[in-house]
Amino acid sequence: MPTSALHANLGQHQALSPRLQQAVRLLQMSSADFVQALSETLQRNPFLEADSADETLVDLSDGASGEPAASAAAEASPAPSNGPDWGDGLPGSSRSGGRAGDDDDGSWMDTMAVETSLAAHLHAQIDLLNIPARDRALAKVVVESLDDDGYLREPLDALIDEGAIEPSPLPEEMRIALCRVQSLEPAGVGARSVQEALLLQLPGIVLPDQRELARRIVSDHLDRLAARDTPGLARSLQRPAQEIEQACARIRQFDPRPGWRFSATRVQYVTPDVIVRKQRGAWTASLNMAIVPKLRMNRVIEELYRTRCRRGNNGELATHLLEARWTLRNVEQRFATIMDVAEAIIERQHAFLDYGPMAMKPLCLREIAEKIGVHESTVSRVTNNKYMATPSGTFELKYFFSRPMATASGGSCSPTALRGLVKTMIEAEQPEAPLSDADITRMLARQGLMVARRTITKYRQGMRFEAAERRYRAG
């Protein structure tokens, strides 16, 4: 008979406590995810409450020890500015001269623009047309078939049965309905191709000669227009290169997707976690207080639990209380760590703040980790999805980190600085003599920067610069 045996193996392994697991999870979240997670915790945990009046980061006193922990992030908040007071005159400001709450004057929200969809915008124009009801209905069938770009991707014949109009419309009626839609604003709507969208916008060109030249370019030479082949267009159309360039520049002002301005898709703007300012000649960082949650312990619920429920069988409430205490401490730890990393980055990259990307220094996670006394993985979590607002723009924290690239003099250069140098060279080139990637490589080599041509190509494409032959402009 088979026998079973038990074996004991001794070993060591690391395990994170629930509190540390929560701290790591909160630390690596973006600002939006962090706010959402705290909102969910606030809704389910009776021991936490929002504190809209308190200006501190969080109230960390849990009532047990009676010693509230100091908030490092709150201490890092910026000092009051002596600049202009923008509160006066803002909508809803208590110091505004108008009567915001007066029904006779109306609310300031009544003056805000209302977002309109493309279909609603076109329907409103169709309703103003002096046409029979049947023609109006057919035009609206076409409108409802447009996509977000404002294009009609379906054949007209496929729309005949969609409107449930009796008697069924003839193909000629549908073509007339499409022409009516194409005459509406924005110009180009109802097109069935990019070429047709551009042709519908040609009436916007005032000069007749330039309009006719633009029509010929769009109708017969759209591929050369896309390739910016000005010399080829000049030869094919037998027109001066300067006139060709002017017509092409006018065409490029057209909107190839006229429906986008009414698209329901909204741009997700980045909210910075840290704001960098120069005060008294030194760069300083402060938390963006707009993303700092106002959270504290609910003293009433905590006291009721301590006096009436603590000795009973209330395991769920005890879990909630423990979670509330962990959350408050982990929130403070998150912002304190972000501030430590941001201040260490500023100390290392202050030249970037003064002079721009070409002054960026090589920087690795280990340097910042040793500076603030944490593990590299902690710095890695902080630098992902956290943003710093500077006078030069808003950047993700990991933007300031890059491996060193050796130079001919024995020093090192940051790839970010190299990209900035390549950008400066391309922007300073002569339009009639654009720099090729090989030209840029040779110019950098003369400055002691040995970079492969394919690396320059990668940097150029990443900055969305076209190849040299497409950047050519006739003099």
Image (cartoon, helix red, strand yellow):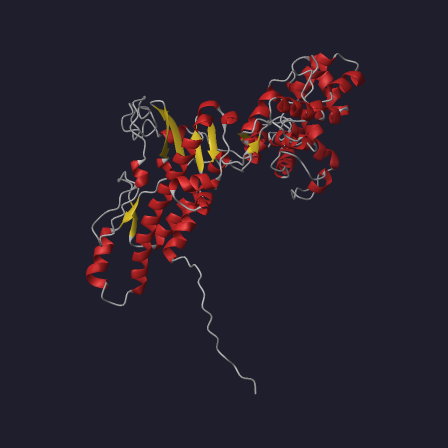
Q: With respect to residue 142, does 300 lie above or below?
A: below
Whether residue 470 is visible = yes
Of 232 and 349, nearer the camera is: 349
Asked if one can make out residue 121 in the rendered structure from this viewpoint, the answer is: no
The quadrant of the image that shows the C terminus is top right
Q: Which of the 4 image quarters holds residue 345?
A: top left
Residue 181: % across, % down: 64, 30
Quarter-of-image position of residue 174: top right
Q: Is residue 425 left or right of residue 267?
A: right
Instruction: From the top left corner, tell me how far across and down residue 288 is, in percent.
Output: 37, 35
Q: Residue furthest bottom?
A: 1
Quadrant containing the N terminus in the rendered view: bottom right
Residue 160: x, y in percent? 70, 41
Q: Is residue 339 above or below residue 218?
A: below
Front-most of residues 86 and 352:
352
Q: Which corner quadrant of the image does residue 433 belong to?
A: top right
Q: Is residue 162 left or right of residue 8?
A: right
Where 114 falls versus 45 (above or below)?
A: above
Which residue is at 46% across, 31% downward? Answer: 394
Tell which of 210 and 350 is nearer to you.
Answer: 350
Residue at the (41%, 54%) spot, across then down: 21
Q: Is residue 83 left or right of residue 12?
A: left
The residue shown at (43%, 42%) is 369
Q: Position of residue 316 (x, y in %)?
A: 32, 62
| Tally of marks | 0
